[in-house]
Image (cartoon, coloured by chain):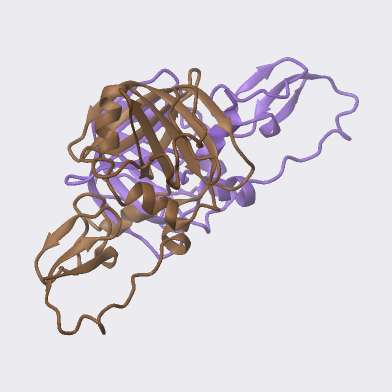
Chain colours: A purple, B brown
Amino acid sequence: MDNKALYNISYGVFMLATKHEGKVNGCITNTCMQVANGPTRVAIACINANYTCELIKKSGIFALSLLDETCDFDTIRHFGMQSGRDVDKFAPGGSFDINTLPADVNQIPYLKEHACSVLSCRVLDSKDLGSHTLFIAEIVDAVLLNDKKPLTYADYQNRVKPRPAAKKEDASDRKIVGWKCRICGYVYEGSELPDDYTCPICKHPKEDFEPVYG
Amino acid sequence: MDNKALYNISYGVFMLATKHEGKVNGCITNTCMQVANGPTRVAIACINANYTCELIKKSGIFALSLLDETCDFDTIRHFGMQSGRDVDKFAPGGSFDINTLPADVNQIPYLKEHACSVLSCRVLDSKDLGSHTLFIAEIVDAVLLNDKKPLTYADYQNRVKPRPAAKKEDASDRKIVGWKCRICGYVYEGSELPDDYTCPICKHPKEDFEPVYG
């Protein structure tokens, strides 16, 4: 089985947010598809280790901001490369201030600046698939925000995501003790990362790992 | 709720095929996403009315050809706009001859010419969502076929799909009795199609319907 064959599945890029008992959090995902009509249903897959996933299991609601082609790496990094367990991603006074962002019908914040649609959803069913939970949801509300094109996952990989920086010159006298995934933060322990290695959490290839020095 | 907001979800385009007790059939779908890793799982949604869906429920296996950017409208029309209940889409001597197409590990035919990957899958779980059934499957095999870009659903809509032909000149003396969906063949009975009408089967808008004359 060639894992690269799966990279040809096309996806969008989304900011998935939820709210439970005053806790608000959001993360970046690339999995959403409409799975039924009359009535409309969507399915999303969310990494079980993510705080947003933990909260959705409790709240049963989420807002999916469909990111558009103007979305920058700072937005992806803010929501996708740090955990809501460590920081408040919607902190007042910050770049994504809960008090200035718009909120959907469930009072969940969404992105207006870099998103072309927002889908407000209520979970009807879920299935734990090990690494991820699959949520099947009804659409409570859906709003078209602008006429920009949606950001595709391929476009994110090819255009939005920065190329890994060449750090070897500065680090010639330091010892590599591990490799950290630049996408999700997972750390592989060991000095050499195998060529065919993919992140066990977010499935990204070796090229997305950066060295961790001892 | 604005249905157009949902059009911003990004998809690929796939030829979904299966085989059951000697019956082989395939259709065009746009829904597939990876929903877990370690082990890898994918989910697809399939229209219940489709013959392919009926067969997958019995066979429990399918091959998903991930169509690439070179795919033409003839291929889409062949698999997507006629029913396997009426014609044998893999008929010997035809454009997609079962005897000349490659077959996957489950002996299901796949497209090599216009597909960049093929995923061979075994259904682990399914859920009937009314219009569609959601299948969760394991990947038995995955093969990268070429290095072309996958065809996205947006690209299919904007580039591959022909514009509706202007037929009004020829039809001025004929009476419109219905409207036929050019995507799935569903027929709306009535002379006028409402502006906000969408196909109840495949969800396509009014623009994809052509008049049926009495």
Q: Quadrant of residue A177?
A: top right
Taking the image as drawn, is residue A54 in sight? no
Q: Position of residue B30 (x, y in %)?
A: 38, 45
Please state if B177 lies on the left or on the right of A185 as rendered: left
Image height check: is B84 above or below B1? above
Q: Position of residue A38 (x, y in %)?
A: 17, 46
Marker count (numbered): 0
Between A49 and A192, the one nearer to me in the picture:
A192
Image height check: is B200 above or below B116? below
Q: Position of residue A195 (x, y in %)?
A: 73, 24
* Residue drawn at (20%, 54%) of the image: B186
Please state if A115 lies on the left or on the right of A158 as rendered: left
Taking the image as drawn, is residue A169 in sight? yes
Please state if B110 lies on the left or on the right of B54 as rendered: right
Between B167 and B29, the one nearer to me in the picture:
B167
Q: Identify the image quadrant of the N terminus of chain B.
A: bottom left
Q: Residue furthest top?
A: A190
Between B134 and A198, the one nearer to me in the picture:
B134
Image height check: is B105 above or below A31? above
* Residue drawn at (61%, 47%) of the image: B148
Q: Identify the image quadrant of the C terminus of chain B.
A: bottom left
Q: Position of residue B66 (x, y in %)?
A: 49, 40
* Residue drawn at (27%, 25%) of the image: B126
